[in-house]
Amino acid sequence: MNRTGLLIILSSPSGAGKSTLARRLMAWDSSLSFSVSATTRPARPGEVDGEHYHFMSPDRFRAMVDSGQMLEHAEVFGNFYGSPLGPVETAMREGKDTLFDVDWQGGQQIRASALGSHVVSIFVLPPSLTELERRLRTRGQDSDTVIAGRMEKSRAEISHWAEYDYVLVNENLEETEASLRDILTAERLRRDRQVWLGTFVKTLMEEKRA
């Protein structure tokens, strides 16, 4: 193992391109693992346990929270959602990075956890709120009332932009993806993440002079 694994937090308001960027990033680097969230809500048609979510009972979810097995969690509309800690710790020990698709609250909890020093947080902004609303309407999935609610929530999400390590404006998808790759490459090369360097430098300094 050349380094410790990273916890990559990717956040954005709905419609800013976060999910598309996450898929592209994982296609670029197959060693990246995606943190599959746990939830107490029932599975929807077509959803697969362990792939889309880890579906579990409220009692089991609470037990995992109480025993420190959830890296972050929240209650949304009466259901619990959270990121199981076990798979993340395993990936870190193997030098693999884990990608989190969470909002600012989830990101805040992860940064405040014992693994906070391994976090790289990235917030994706839309080029404008007008463009964001256009993208939401283009989906054709939501009513005007739902879209208005999403736009209001987007303003609240955007207000937390300064809490992140990096902020990208997703005006051009290819350029934003390239910036994400650059960020990940640079963060992987940071001195404090290279666990092998100390031994290497010690050996280097002990070499006999010519």
Image (cartoon, rainbow, N blue to C red):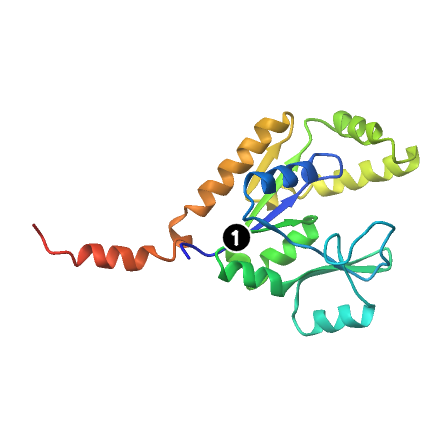
Name the residue: 79% across, 42% down. 153
Picture layout, residue 110 above or below residue 62:
above
Residue 2 at what x, y percent from top left? Answer: 40, 54
Query: Which of the two residues, 38 or 81, is positioned nearer the viewer here?
Result: 38
Q: Residue at x 72, y 54 (%)?
A: 51
Q: Position of residue 71 (x, y in %)?
A: 64, 62
Name the residue nearer the viewer: 180 or 154: 180
Q: Which of the two residues, 110 or 178, is positioned nearer the viewer here?
A: 178
Residue 202: where, in percent of width, then height? Answer: 24, 59
Quarter assignment of residue 90 = bottom right
Q: How far across and how far down the image is residue 75, in percent?
A: 80, 59
Quadrant where the N terminus sits is bottom left
Locate residue 166 relative to residue 16 in the image: left or right.
Answer: left
Kind of residue sitting beneath label 1: Leu
> What residue do we see at 55% from left, 37% from top?
180
- In screen coordinates, is 82 left or right of 96? right
Label 1 CA crowd tier, 10 Å (few <14, some 14–19, many 20+): many
For the residue pair 161 and 113, the one nearer the viewer reads as 113
Quadrant of residue 206 within the rendered picture: bottom left
Q: Is residue 51 above or below residue 124?
A: below
Q: Total of numbered circles in the picture? A: 1
**Residue assigned mark 1:** 6
- As drawn, the residue found furthest toward the left would be 210
In the image, residue 80 above or below residue 65: above
- Secondary structure beneath disc 1? loop
Position of residue 50 in the picture relative to residue 143 (left or right): left
